[in-house]
Image: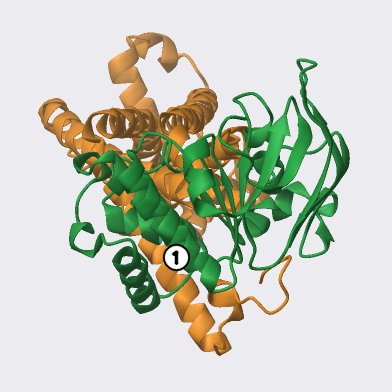
């Protein structure tokens, strides 16, 4: 719409178009500018590629952190499963009671298997292995308790579920002590949490640097096209119109950066896996590493293009406004 | 169409570029703006195109005071004014066609409309066969004509030209002025800043003469001996 001349039509806004037609032409115009800004990147391959590489490597680190923590959690889950719970019975418990208890426990749905180490067997074993054999003969009765070693079902091997099972076992009358050896696991978890926090802090810093790198690249490209922007302003382009290709360029940087970092992390994973295979073969503990799922890759692209857009927006907001034509 | 009402312009440096300038260019009128370099011709054009704001007084276009136009609305005012620059101001890395199409792309016209109107504008300035060339492959006069095609492609009611014949020989200058006359014939107001007094004398149009920032003479051109 013309500001000064009432009857003078200007562009799309004044032609008689339906809402659908306007929407279509809006999309077409954006698609055109997105492609055009891709073409601009293509025309300056050197600087564009440099920026994309910086973005790709910067994003690779957070992506690699994520993969490490994801695979770490998977491995830790295997190790952390409290596979065994030792139940020490009171000494006063009679043989029949123990048999009854073992039979009972075997019906529990949380429990996979119950192994009973009787106090008599334990005493014999202790005599044989400890070297106190003769000394023990002087004792009036067996100081050792009956021990049940319980293996929970797979579903109840997580730390929290196992703890619940421990509590249930402690409630039983003949039980004196239940031992779930997870303290070292809890320490491991704490260490892992510290490492994860460090990674998150580093990843945040890297993402910030991605935003700044895009912002700076866009700033340079705005300055290198100063004359062109002046001409556009002279013939009546709004700031919004001028900044749109730069915003799209920011998005493209993000998309290509994400793609590059996907390639880098995939190579990294493949490299680590071959090294890891050798290690795990020695320990007879095969691990297969998980790469980025399609949904995670898509998420990475979206986040990266969002950061690209933010970086370029910060830049255009400041610099395009500052360019004023002088004739 | 264009009215100056006691306009003063003092630059930040203290230079008093325009002093109490008043004139009225009517709809469909064509006029020359002349004076020595530094007399305020460029400043006067800049005030119309909102490249500068007056220190005092008012500039009206079609009865609207430009003082009331906010920064956000400046682009829309410029779309109503076709401006032709002495240094052409073309995009050197785009072909002639893209240069002429720029104002229409900015206004969001459809592809077919753009192609039709750009072809018409290029035809008018006689450069239809050079649409695919880069501006650097054209002569100075041809580049100036590309700038004219760009200025008129969206049919603005006002055309401003700053030294449009600056570096051209008399024959080419005349050719370009004939173009302006053609636009003027379809009721476009045309204001041409030039110091080419010989040209003005031959054309017999209203001439605004600035001297040291003041409107010195407003009427038919004085003798070239001025």
Question: Disc 1 marks which residue?
Answer: B153
Quarter in which the N terminus of chain B is drawn = bottom right
Chain of the residue under label 1: B
Q: Is residue A189 in sight in this rendering?
A: no
Q: Give the residue drawn at x 27%, y 62%.
A: B126
Q: Colour of chain A?
A: orange
* A269 up-or-down from B5: above or below: above
Expressed as whole percent of the image width and height from the top left, the position of residue A42 reads 24, 43
What is the quadrant of residue A289 in the picture?
top left
- Mark 1 lies on a secondary structure that is loop
Please give left or right for residue B214 compared with residue A165 in the image: right
Expressed as whole percent of the image width and height from the top left, the position of residue A16 reads 57, 88
Q: Which chain is green?
A: B
Q: Viewer-proximal residue, A185 or A88?
A: A185
Please give left or right for residue A103 compared with residue A314 in the image: left
Q: Give the residue drawn at x 68%, y 34%.
A: B43
Q: Viewer-proximal residue, A298 or A45?
A: A45
What is the quadrant of residue B22 in the picture?
top right
The number of numbered badges drawn on the structure is 1
Please give left or right for residue A277 compared with residue B73 in the image: left
Q: Give the residue drawn at x 46%, y 38%.
A: B86
Q: Is residue B78 in sight in this rendering?
A: yes
Q: Give the residue drawn at x 72%, y 66%.
A: A3
Quarter in which the C terminus of chain B is drawn = top right
Q: Viewer-proximal residue, A262 or B56?
A: B56
Expressed as whole percent of the image width and height from the top left, the position of residue B192 reads 56, 48
What is the quadrant of residue A163 in the picture?
top right
**Structural crowding at the residue carrying mark 1, measured as other residues with C-alpha within 10 Å and reported as few (<14), some (14–19) or many (≥20):** many
């Amino acid at each position: 719409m013309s500001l000064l001349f009432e009857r003078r039509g200007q562009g799309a806004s004044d032609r008689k178009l339906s809402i659908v037609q306007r929407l279509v032409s809006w999309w077409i115009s954006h698609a055109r500018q997105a492609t055009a800004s891709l073409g601009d990147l293509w025309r300056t391959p050197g600087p564009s590629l440099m920026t994309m590489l910086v973005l790709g490597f910067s994003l690779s680190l957070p992506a690699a952190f994520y993969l490490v923590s994801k695979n770490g959690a998977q491995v830790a889950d295997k190790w952390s499963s409290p596979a065994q719970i030792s139940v020490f019975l009171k000494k006063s418990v009679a043989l029949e009671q123990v048999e009854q208890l073992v039979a009972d426990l075997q019906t529990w749905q949380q429990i996979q298997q119950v192994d009973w180490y009787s106090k008599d067997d334990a005493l014999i074993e202790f005599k044989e292995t400890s070297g106190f054999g003769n000394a023990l003969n002087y004792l009036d009765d067996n100081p050792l308790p009956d021990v049940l070693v319980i293996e929970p079902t797979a579903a109840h091997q997580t730390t929290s579920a196992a703890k619940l099972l421990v509590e249930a076992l402690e409630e039983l009358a003949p039980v004196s002590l239940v031992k779930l050896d997870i303290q070292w696991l809890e320490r491991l978890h704490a260490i892992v949490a510290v490492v994860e926090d460090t990674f998150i802090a580093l990843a945040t810093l890297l993402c910030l640097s991605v935003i700044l790198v895009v912002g700076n690249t866009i700033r340079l490209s705005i300055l290198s096209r100063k004359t062109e922007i002046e001409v556009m302003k002279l013939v009546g382009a709004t700031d919004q119109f001028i900044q749109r290709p730069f915003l799209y360029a920011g998005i493209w940087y993000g998309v290509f950066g994400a793609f590059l970092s996907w390639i880098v992390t995939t190579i990294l994973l493949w490299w680590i896996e071959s090294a890891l295979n050798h290690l795990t073969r020695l320990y007879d503990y095969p691990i297969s590493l998980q790469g980025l799922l399609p949904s995670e890759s898509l998420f990475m692209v979206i986040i990266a293009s969002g950061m690209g857009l933010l970086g370029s927006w910060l830049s255009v907001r400041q610099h395009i406004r500052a360019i004023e034509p002088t004739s | 169409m264009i009215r100056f009402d006691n306009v003063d312009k003092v630059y930040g440096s203290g230079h008093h570029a325009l002093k109490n300038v008043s004139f009225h260019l009517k709809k469909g009128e064509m006029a020359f703006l002349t004076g020595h370099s530094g007399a305020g011709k460029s400043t006067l054009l800049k005030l119309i195109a909102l490249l500068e704001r007056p220190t005092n007084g008012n500039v009206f276009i079609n009865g609207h005071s430009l003082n009331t136009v906010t920064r956000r609305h400046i682009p829309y005012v410029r779309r109503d004014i076709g401006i032709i620059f002495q240094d052409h101001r073309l995009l050197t890395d785009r072909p002639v066609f893209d240069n002429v199409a720029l104002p229409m792309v900015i206004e969001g016209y459809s592809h077919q409309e753009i192609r039709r109107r750009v072809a018409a504008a290029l035809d008018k300035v006689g450069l239809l066969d050079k649409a695919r060339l880069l501006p650097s492959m054209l002569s100075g006069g041809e580049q100036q004509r590309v700038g004219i095609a760009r200025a008129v492609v969206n049919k603005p009611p006002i055309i401003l030209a700053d030294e449009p014949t600056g570096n051209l020989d008399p024959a080419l200058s005349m050719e370009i002025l004939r173009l302006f006359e053609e636009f003027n014939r379809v009721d476009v107001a045309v204001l041409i800043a030039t110091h080419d007094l010989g040209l003005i004398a031959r054309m017999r149009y209203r001439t605004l003469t600035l001297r040291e920032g003041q409107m010195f003479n407003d009427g038919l051109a004085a003798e070239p001996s001025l």
